[in-house]
Image: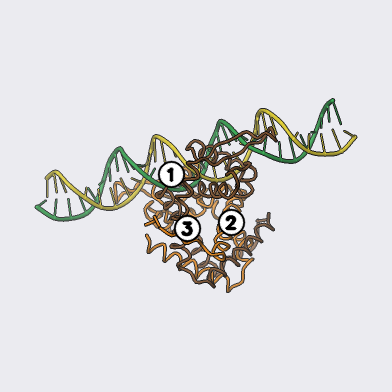
Chain colours: A brown, B orange, C green, D yellow
Amino acid sequence: MDGMDAPRWLDDDQQRAWRAYLRMQAQLGAALNRQLQAACGLSLADYDVLVHLTDVPDGRLRPYELQRALEWEQSRLSHHLSRMQRRGLVERQECADDGRGAFVVLTEAGREAITTAAPGHVETVRALFFDALGPEQVEALRQLTTQVLARLDAAG
Amino acid sequence: MDGMDAPRWLDDDQQRAWRAYLRMQAQLGAALNRQLQAACGLSLADYDVLVHLTDVPDGRLRPYELQRALEWEQSRLSHHLSRMQRRGLVERQECADDGRGAFVVLTEAGREAITTAAPGHVETVRALFFDALGPEQVEALRQLTTQVLARLDAAG
DNA sequence: ACGGAATAGATGACACGTCATATAGGTTGG
DNA sequence: CCAACCTATATGACGTGTCATCTATTCCGT
């Protein structure tokens, strides 16, 4: 799959685009993380977990459902839930239907954290990202990322 | 800076674009990391460090220069260099001019690793990313990421 | 009913990142 | 000259991510 013979490099336009993308990706992620951390002590990962739990009746999901929704590795989720449990953001419950299974449940503290966090986070995403772009650019980005995702899915 | 009153949510187009971006960002990064790891036991971070060292005469830089080039936190670089040193990819040398200072030097193993890794890595970037896009899309991406970067720099 | 395969989840080891702090050497105004 | 300060770098603690592996169930074909 790799041992190529004549390495085709990226052309100048591709280089520029790639570098800019990598820089933006790193800085944007860092900025969003800092904002969330400062505003309410959550990480982006915490935020994503809490959003998914909030979106569901009873704030309660099987870990494997959460895993598929987040597209995380199983052990990443398991470790992360342990840490969030330690901080009181979620709880684990046994699952009556399936002896192997469990439930992750949003606690009151968890629900409050995400409720507090969401407006500021969305505002930051807008301020740092969408406010810099016109609607055509947003559409172009959606289109282009979707195409790359299709490619990634195809590659497995 | 955050405690907004009436939270303005993202509109549907923005939501779609944002979700697609986050998904692509995560999956692309993971795929590139896996490829590098499988092909030559390097991480993306290793790769970036080695590229910068390769681009310079003697393969030798002061850590603070490397830090600014990579836009990494200082302690991240220091820790990472320690790990790379342990694996024999770089060495540390004392700096005669400045008693506090040091040099990071590419070892032979380091130079060989990056030489081996680069073609496959570039090929993967092309295969997973640029092959999915037309030239106008590449230009649109460059433009859009550059605008966001300007915004991020301004927010500092 | 049973034995093997698949599924749900947890865990330990270890790489990676960040924050706060430590150390030591330069720089400079008085 | 030297005290206050700034710069270069390292480190320890701790949160995060991955891989390999372990356990307990459930499922399924015979």
The residue identified by callout 1 is B79
The x and y percentages for residue B105 are 43, 50
Q: CA distance from mark 1 to mark 2?
A: 29 Å
For disc 2, the neighbor class at 10 Å (few under 14, some 14 to 19, many from 20) is: some
Three-letter code for the amino acid on which mark 1 is drawn: His
Q: Is residue A97 above or below residue A131?
A: above
Residue type indicated by callout 3: Val
Q: Chain of mark 3?
A: A
Tag of residue A122: 3
Horizontal side of residue D2 vs A95, given as left or right:
left
Helix, strand or loop for disc 2: helix
Please, is residue A79 above or below residue A120 in the view? above
Counting from the top left corner in percent of width and height, residue A109 is at 47, 41
C-alpha span from label 3 to label 2: 17 Å
Residue at mark 2: B23
Q: Tell me the residue at 44%/62% (across/down).
A: A128
Image quadrant in which the N terminus of chain B is located: bottom left
Q: Mark 1: few, some, or many residues within 10 Å (few <14, many ≥20)? A: few
**The residue tagged with tag 1: helix, strand or loop?**
helix
| Residue drawn at the location 41% of the way across and 62% of the way down | B152
How far separated are the C-alphas under marks 3 and 1?
33 Å
